[in-house]
Image (cartoon, rainbow, N blue to C red):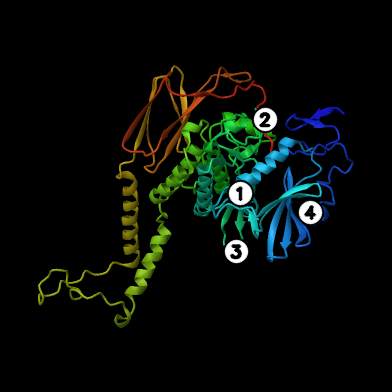
Amino acid sequence: MADVPCATCQTPVPENALYCPSCGSRTGRGDSRAEVPVASDVPERLARALGTNYEVRQLLGEGGFAQVFEVWDRGLERRLAVKVLKPDLAWSSGMLERFKQETRSIARLNHPNILPIHFVGEGEGLVFYAMPFVQGEALSGLLRRQGALPAERAIAILRPLLEALGHAHTEGLIHRDIKPDNVMLEASTGRPLLVDFGIAKRIDGAGHQTQAGFVVGTPQYMSPEQALGQGDLDARTDLYAVGAMLYQMVTGTPPFDGASSQEIVGKHLSEPAPFATNHNAQIPAWLSDVIVRCLAKRPAERYQSAAALLEALAAGRKSGAQEPVSAERVVRQLHADDATAVMPSAERPRPLAGPAAGQPPGRPRGAPPVPARPARGGWGRQLALLGVAGALTAGMFLFRGSPVLVVENKLVEPVRLVVGGATVEVAAGGTLEQKVPRQGPLVVQWYLVRPEGPSGPLGVEVQGSITIDRPRGRMPRTLSARTPARRSLPRSSPTPPAACSR
């Protein structure tokens, strides 16, 4: 029987297969009941394979390759989540080995934010493994319900996940499918859990089950090197996906989206990373810069480890802007002060032991008291204090000595820079001096300005980035023919490789 290419990833698929053996996409062929995801007797077969000590209760969810069932362990009186490979798929020995690799990968990990494996089983034509049951919801469900999260909430969720990733990377594993669907939030504690190492890969290359050039992952969160099917992936590809997920957590949308996997992958390969502050001005600028660095096209320009990203988040929280002092907040404090001023003297808070009331510190005992100055009128006092607060706020920005980025363009064409969410053009031979926030890291995207033709910019699109970990003082940078840069995909380039979601 002739094989037919999968419409999603072009892998040859047996003519009557319901699912692609590589990406799990539904083919819509071979069975008039194509809407039925798997054989209807899977729960009964799983119950027989598990034995009488277990009760299969309900289907919890499914992906491209597997279904997850809630199972009751009668002997230990506990709830389990059992993941079962879909038997209707055109399974190959490579896919079964990938599933077994998943179980081995997770079993090697020991971290409170990674779900462990209880046991692996096979029987009744099914292959499965059991994990603890988690009462809660996926991060993707939370984002659908609430939209964008406050920055502090997003960071609180991300930090333990980064610690879990760091543990996995130390054990020689990369996840390769970091996304909101693969983060569970425990209902009772709020604890975030990293799940589904189904396409995990040993960093040293062992256990790599995918074919050369074949892309596995989810397009919205996929690093450029993963989208290109490169085999030498490392921990930095997970950090790219973390940046994409963090962008979605604070803005409500992924950094790149489109009508097809090919369109999304093309944006990951060629478009500059977006600034989260452009989407929502309330997002701290330092956090937006952290995300941009995570989304750098070249792995060498990203954070090099989960620990380094954790340090950047900690430093940003310490140096980031505090709650803004608004006029309303000052007036509230003034009203509170005025309420205290009109209280009967017996009810006012007594001063701590020290100089007598009305007597300045260090004044000799027995000296006549200094006459008190008359209190100002209510509005006059409020306006005066508002003026002081405004002056202090302005002074914080004007006199703290903001770092200055100095970019000299020695190229023969103008360049466009994205600095702190603002786009600035620098002519050929020109120089830009731009004040930037003190808190780091600073990531500046630049690209050549090409003349427009009938079908878009003429010539090869070239872009690069400037990364400064700790902005201080004057920071001169030069763009020249020796500056590291990369070519974007031309508009007439072939369609990028297909990216397949699990």
Q: Is residue 53 above or below residue 92?
A: below
Residue at screen point 28% across, 67% down: 376
Q: Secondary structure at mark 4?
A: helix
Residue holding disc 3: 188
**First of labels 1, 2 by sequence position:** 1
Q: Gap in Å between the C-alphas at discs 4 and 1?
A: 21 Å
Task: Report whether 301 appears left or right of 260.
Answer: left
Where in the figure is residue 356, as x and y percent of width and height? 18, 76
Residue at screen point 63% across, 48% down: 182
Residue holding disc 1: 107
Q: Gap in Å between the C-alphas at discs 4 and 3?
A: 32 Å
Q: Is residue 295 visible?
A: yes
Dot 4, how many residues are within 10 Å of its Cα: few (below 14), some (14-19), or many (20+)?
some
Mark 1 or 2: in front is 1
Q: 153 or 41, which is in the foreground? A: 41
Residue holding disc 2: 211
Q: Secondary structure at mark 1?
A: helix
Residue at screen point 51% across, 54% down: 156
Q: Amino acid at mark 3?
A: Ser
> How many labels sit on residues?
4
Q: Amino acid at mark 4?
A: Ala
**First of labels 2, 4 by sequence position:** 4
Q: Secondary structure at mark 2?
A: loop
Q: Amino acid at mark 1?
A: Ala
Tag shown at residue 172 = none
Q: Quadrant of the N terminus?
A: top right
